[in-house]
Amino acid sequence: MTSLTKKDKDAVRAFWSKVAGKSEDIGADAVCRMLTVYPQTKTYFDHWKDKSPNSASAKKHGVTVMSGVAEAVVQIEDMKAGLQSLSELHAFTLRVDPANFKILSHCILVVMAIMFPNDFTPQVHVAMDKFLASLALCLSEKYR
């Protein structure tokens, strides 16, 4: 995996400053898309009464996901250390297949591109893709 350059980090921070106010909407849409396009991901949400993509539970989880993304932006200089507790939660308590981090990352990228077409330039796309891949890797850290 390619590490984030200073230019990538700057692009992520700048883009995040533009989209952070809509992060709850981004997360809700991304989780809804994930559940629709990758229905096998529903197995991790057996505790939800309604597992439909537009359920209140799905939207709430999107908010939770994006708060983690926001934390990763803050911890961008050392995400591995900064997200250690999230990695432990996913590995030891939630037992989420790490492949799902990549799936959700892709859904987040799609939603960002749709919601912010003028700001989601090719350079931002590359930086955000690398950032979300790094985030997924950090969340997978405790699985090793």
Image: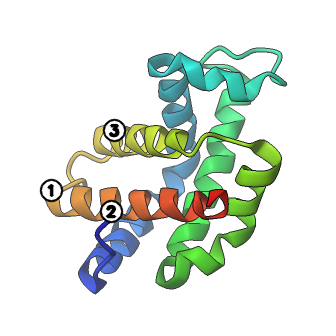
| Percent position of residue 30, x then y | 49, 35
Name the residue carrying label 1. 122
Foreground mark, 1 or 2? 2
Q: Secondary structure at mark 1?
A: helix
Q: Residue 67 appears in which quarter of the rendering?
A: bottom right
Q: Are marks 2 and 3 in contact (CB under 8 Å)?
A: no
Foreground mark, 2 or 3? 2
Measuring 50% from the left and 28% from the top, which residue is drawn there?
34
Name the residue carrying label 3. 110
- Label 2 CA crowd tier, 10 Å (few <14, some 14–19, many 20+): many
Q: How is the rendered protein coloured?
A: rainbow
Image height check: is 132 above or below 17? Answer: above
Measuring 28% from the left and 65% from the top, which residue is drawn there?
127
Name the residue carrying label 2. 130
In the rendered image, is residue 25 in sight?
Answer: no
Q: CA distance from mark 1 to mark 2?
A: 12 Å
| Percent position of residue 7, x then y | 24, 81
Q: Nearer the viewer, residue 55 or 9?
A: 9
Give the position of the N terminus as an image quadrant.
Answer: bottom left
Instruction: Of the two numbered discs 2 and 3 on the same chain, state the one appearing first in sequence.
Output: 3
133 relative to 73 in the view: left or right: left
Image height check: is 130 above or below 61? Answer: below
Give the position of the C terminus as an image quadrant.
Answer: bottom right
Measuring 17% from the left and 63% from the top, which residue is drawn there?
123
The type of residue carrying mark 1 is Pro
Q: Secondary structure at mark 3?
A: helix
- Label 1 CA crowd tier, 10 Å (few <14, some 14–19, many 20+): few
- Label 3 CA crowd tier, 10 Å (few <14, some 14–19, many 20+): some
